[in-house]
């Protein structure tokens, strides 16, 4: 009834709009990275002509990213924070998404509304609430101290001061990252779990599989795309996050790659270095995104048994 070019043509304006909003700003960042700095005003002078690009700043950043240098330590710390935060989101978020998709029949709508509620409040306000909770004398710190959790974390080496969670503690930054991004992880995972045909689970049970084996061999593999989608959705912005460590810590010992970029762009005399770090971080994230796309493509060709 419709010509084959109709639906691709209807999507063309949106695709062009997204490409323009991505390509133009990214090209501007590249021009800043390969440009120069005004020696008097200390402002960036982009090199808009590719023939005038100077790779000196990018080479300088690559040298600083070598093991043992300052950026290497920050990059490793960022990877550790992101991996631990992702693990925390999986541990907390997967059971929640599984329960809503499989067992919450009457309360499913209510639980979904509760998951969406954090989006109604500014991310900044939610992080500031953690400051009030974990500040000396705050209700959250009192609860942790009264229940012995602070002492347990201190003796386990997770925190260095059981009375000061806002004094440059990695645990606080990871906790804030999990709290801030976990709704973005649960929603796509719930959608993936909710689409699984229950007949696959019934077939596994008919073949003698226990509930655990049915989950391990049927539910978990079929939810892999949603799990990876949620992981990509939260890890990509986590790598560039700079406001969360600033709000709940603000110490150089917990700074991430995003903090270094923000430092050079807004407070440092070398915005070209900030642009170069942005390019290298984008290249690293492109590798992760490529792995995600390859995994999704391979999973789409597999036929569940």
Image (tube, helix red, strand yellow):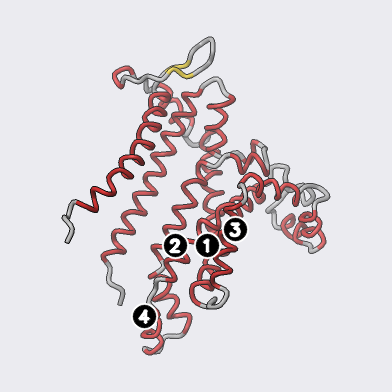
Looking at the rendered structure, the secondary structure element under dot 1 is helix
Q: Name the residue under label 4.
A: 200
Q: Earlier in the sequence, mark 1 or mark 4?
A: 1
Q: Do the residues labelled 4 and 3 touch (CB within 8 Å)?
A: no
CA distance for labels 1 and 4: 23 Å
Furthest-front residue in view? 1
Question: Mark 2 — residue?
Answer: 227
When the figure is inspected, residue 166 is found, relative to residue 42, above or below; the finding is below
Give the CA separation, mark 2 to mark 3.
22 Å
Q: Which of marks 1 and 4 is in front?
A: 4
Label 1 with label 2: CB-CB less than 8 Å: yes
Q: Which of marks 4 and 3 is in front?
A: 3
Q: Which residue is drawn at 34% across and 49% down?
A: 290
Relative image position of residue 164 (x, y in whole percent)? 77, 47
Q: In this view, does 117 lie above or below 161?
A: below
Q: How crowded is mark 1: few (under 14 residues within 10 Å), some or many (20 or more)?
A: many
Label 1 or label 3, whichever comes before in sequence order: 1
Among the two numbered marks 4 and 2 on one chain, the one whose residue lies closer to the N terminus: 4
Question: Where does label 1 land, which residue?
Answer: 90
Residue of label 3: 117
- Mark closest to the chain's N terminus, 2 or 3: 3
Q: In which quarter of the image is the C terminus?
A: bottom left
Relative to 134, is 210 above or below?
Answer: below
Q: Verify CB contact (< 8 Å) between mark 4 and mark 2.
A: no
The residue closer to the viewer here, 8 or 92, is 8
Q: Position of residue 264 (x, y in %)?
A: 54, 27
Contact (CB < 8 A) between labels 1 and 4?
Answer: no
Q: Which residue lies furthest to the top in this view?
A: 40
Tell me whether circle 1 and circle 3 mark residues in contact (CB < 8 Å): no
């Amino acid at each position: 009834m419709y010509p084959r070019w109709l639906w691709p043509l209807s999507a063309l304006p949106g695709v062009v709009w997204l490409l323009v909003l991505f390509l133009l700003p990214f090209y501007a960042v590249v021009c800043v990275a390969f440009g120069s700095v005004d020696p008097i005003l200390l402002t960036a002078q982009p090199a808009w002509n590719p023939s005038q690009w100077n790779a000196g700043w990018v080479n300088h950043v690559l040298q600083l990213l070598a093991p043992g240098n300052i950026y290497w330590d920050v990059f490793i710390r960022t990877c550790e924070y992101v991996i631990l935060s992702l693990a925390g989101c999986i541990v907390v978020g997967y059971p929640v998404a599984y329960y809503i998709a499989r067992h919450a029949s009457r309360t499913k709508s209510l639980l979904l509304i509760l998951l969406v509620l954090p989006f109604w409040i500014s991310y900044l306000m939610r992080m500031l609430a953690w400051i009030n909770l974990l500040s000396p004398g705050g209700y959250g710190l009192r609860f942790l101290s009264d229940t012995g959790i602070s002492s347990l974390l201190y003796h386990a080496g997770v925190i260095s001061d059981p009375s000061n969670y806002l004094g440059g503690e990695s645990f606080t930054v990871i906790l804030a990252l999990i709290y801030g991004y976990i709704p973005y992880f649960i929603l796509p995972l719930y959608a993936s779990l909710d689409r699984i045909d229950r007949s696959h689970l019934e077939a596994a049970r008919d073949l003698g599989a226990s509930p655990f084996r049915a989950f391990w061999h049927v539910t978990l593999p079929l939810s892999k795309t949603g799990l990876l989608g949620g992981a990509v959705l939260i890890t990509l912005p986590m790598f560039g996050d700079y406001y969360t460590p600033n709000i709940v810590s603000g110490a150089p010992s917990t700074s991430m790659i995003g903090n270094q970029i923000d430092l050079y762009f807004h407070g440092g005399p070398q915005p070209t270095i900030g642009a170069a770090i942005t390019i290298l971080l984008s290249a690293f994230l492109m590798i992760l995104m490529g792995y995600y796309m390859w995994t999704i493509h391979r999973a789409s060709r597999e036929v569940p048994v």
